Image: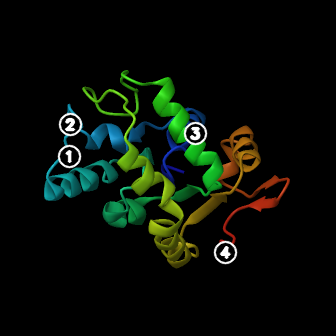
Amino acid sequence: MQRVMVIGASGAGKSTLARRIGTALGLPVIHLDREFWRPGWVEPDADEWLERLDALAARECWVIDGNQSRGWGFRLARADAIVWLDLPRRVYFTRAVLRSLRNLGRERADIGPGCPERIDLKFLAHWVWSYPVRARPRTIATLDRVRNEKRVFILRSSTDVRVFEAGLPASLTGIAESATGPIAFRPPT
């Protein structure tokens, strides 16, 4: 296992899980938000960003956390495994709000330098709250297309995440068990 994508809604715990996978497998971790944002929360040019994404995915080994679904192409093609944190909205939304409050005015390690945490209601409404309607259907369709070629793990609860983490690195090579059953590809509900 040399390349692992970790995806999910903001606040789901992607960065934390990516760091734990990276430690368990001895792989470098790439936080896409850290690569994307320029100081002052400035976005890069779209073409420049897609080139950067392709360059990151071209590396020999990695754990990449972040959605950036418009740039999934090369990253998805190179990934050995995809871990989707498909947690309930009440969990990830609450975490995203609390994270913003807890880190207000401070720079986080998984975000680019010069981007202090802020309360951004537009971000919370558009990217976090609307995730189940805006991004989840695309994720389901994409993972359904690659499930016979890639190891796809869908973690739907905090318990699933804890079991998966406790079983690392074996969780990525087999099927872990949780209170809700096997943690591997299941058609999302």
Label 3 vs 2, first from the N-terminus: 2
- Mark-to-mark CA distance, 4 and 2: 37 Å
Foreground disc of the pair 4, 3: 3
Q: Which residue is mark 1?
A: 43
Query: Which is nearer the N-term, disc 4 or disc 1?
Result: 1
In this view, the residue farthest toward the top is 106
User: Is there CB contact under 8 Å for labels 3 and 1?
Assistant: no
Check residue 38 in the rendering and tell me which mark sits there, or answer none: 2
From the image, tell me which residue sits under label 4.
187
The residue pinned by badge 3 equals 95
Kindly check if marks 1 and 2 are in contact, taking CB atoms under 8 A apart as contact.
yes
The image quarter containing residue 181 is bottom right
User: Where does the image place residue 103, in percent across and percent down from the top left?
Assistant: 45, 24
Residue 50, located in which quarter of the rendered image? Answer: bottom left
Q: Amino acid at mark 1?
A: Glu
Looking at the rendered structure, the kind of residue marked 2 is Arg
